[in-house]
Each structure stands twice: as structure tokens, then as C-alpha cells.
Amino acid sequence: MAFEQITVEVENGVGRITLSRPAERNAMTPQMGRELTRAVADLNADPEARVVVIRGAGKGFCSGADLRTLGAEAGAAGAAEGLGGNENFYRLFLSIRDLQVPSIAAINGHAVGAGLCFALGADMRVMHRDAKVGMTFVRLGIHPGMAATWTLPRLVGPAIAAELLYSGRMVGAEEAVAIGLVNRVAGEDFDDVVDEMAAGIAAAAPIAVRTVKQTLAGWQQRSLDDALVREAGVQMMTFGTEDAAEGIRAMRAKRAPAFRGR
């Protein structure tokens, strides 16, 4: 299916979604959100995709919602997806949380407001050392949206989250990694660092990785006993896969395994 505001590709086990409105710093529109939702479904149906990298075209990652177009698209459906506090717009972009494989937000440039919320929807984040990020909603006179008040405290803790949400200030790369907002910071080697992280995940056993993602998704609701039961059951299932047999053979032969997702 053709896309206009994003691009999607899969190569060597790595899926790539690129927000493609560089002239507008990849500002988010309802159309972009709908395309993103379709892309997630396509990647979930693609057995070759083992990890997904999400980034912005050009120099920016995402400048947030495009206030010029939100709510202005023709028809009631377009208006229903507008900013105006409507959760439908948020859900379109947070569909990346529905990816069945791990996701990496490659924050190649500034990620602002809803653009940062979008990046926080990924499992991991790599940030360019020259980029800045910020929950700038209050600086526009509006309450944060797109799960900002849910996601941020879980990543950086309630006190730091409160300060960032109350002030709306921008955060540099070194501070972002120090507070746990991003996993890694990179400079001229940014693309290499992102690709290395993605390749490492793509080389792991696909069934095991997918089930780990499912387990991690519910960690906050589980007790220690619940976690042990979940892990034991899923581990037993994965022991019965062809990939597990291949992993053991490769370990004994002291070679890299060739996992096939079976």
C-alpha cells in the first residue's frame, strides 16, 4: 500500500518507518497517523520484520502536531481526529505500541511535544547529541496529551516527570540519557549506532524476542510470583521451537546461530 507522509521498508530483518514531511519538520497530521496505523499492521503481518526503527526525514525527528492541519481535514472524520483534546488523534500515533516486534526511535533531530510522546511509544530510543526534546505543551497554554503524563513518570520517575511537564523546557541529549529518557546518545556515528542496535535484535531468535516483548508489556501489573509463572510457561514453549534447538547447536559448535523464527 502506498504512503504519502511516511515511508516503510524492510531489509535484513529490520523494518524502517520514516516520517516524511521534512519541510514541516515532520509535523504530525491525521493522515500521517492513519498511514502509520496501516504501516504497523503491515509490519506485524511481515514475517521478515524482526525489529522496527522509527525516525524522521531530514534534520528533525518530529516537531509535534501540525496545528495548521489538525481538525481542518474535510468531513466529520477529519475533525474527529483533530488535536482539540480528542483521543483519536493520539491513538493513531501510539499505534506503534502495537508493534509485535521491538521498536527503536532514532531521534535524529528535535522531538517536541507530541513528537516526543510519539518517540516514547517505542521500546528504546537513540538520540543524536545535537538534538533536543521537550514536553512543551504548557508553553502553548495546553495540557499535555498523547499519554505524556502516563509514559514520562514510568521512564524518569514522578519528580523529574513533574518538572519537565510543569516547565515544558527542552532537554539536551546528555541529560536525556542521564535521566533514563533515552538509551544511547550518538554523534557522527548516529546511523551506525542505530543500525548496530537494530541488527543485534534482528539476529536474536524471533519467537523468543516477540514473547519477551509481550512479557515486558505487562510487567507493572504482575507480582513476582506472576512473573515466575509467566516466564516458566513461555520459556517451556520456546524450548520446543526449532530456534531453541539451533541456538543450542550453535553454542556447542561455537558459531553464530541462524534463527528462522520457527
Image (cartoon, rainbow, N blue to C red):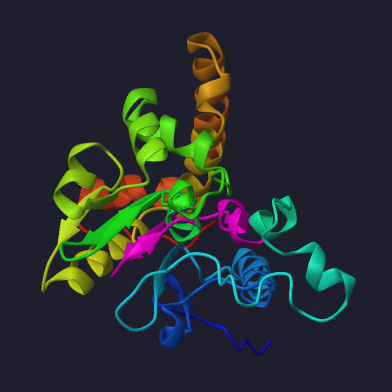
> In x, y percent, where is residue 4?
60, 89
Residue 98: in magenta span: yes
Residue 149 appears in the rendering: yes
Residue 204: in magenta span: no
The magenta segment is: 92-113
> In x, y percent, where is residue 35?
65, 76
Q: 103 and 34: which one is in front? A: 34
Left or right of residue 145: residue 62: left
Q: Residue furthest left?
A: 188
Q: Residue at x 85, y 70 (%)?
A: 77
Quarter of the image with the N terminus is bottom right
Q: Residue at x 14, y 49 (%)?
A: 174
Q: 99 and 37: which one is in front? A: 37
Quarter of the image with the C terminus is bottom right
Count of numbered circles in the view: 0
> In x, y percent, where is residue 240?
54, 40
Whether 159 is drawn above or below 201: the answer is above
> In x, y percent, where is residue 185?
17, 56
Left or right of residue 116: residue 178: left
Q: Residue at x 19, y 69 (%)?
A: 190
Q: Residue furthest front?
A: 141
Residue 239 appears in the rendering: no
Q: 232 and 201: which one is in front? A: 201
Left or right of residue 2: residue 108: left
> For residue 106, which quarter of the picture?
bottom left
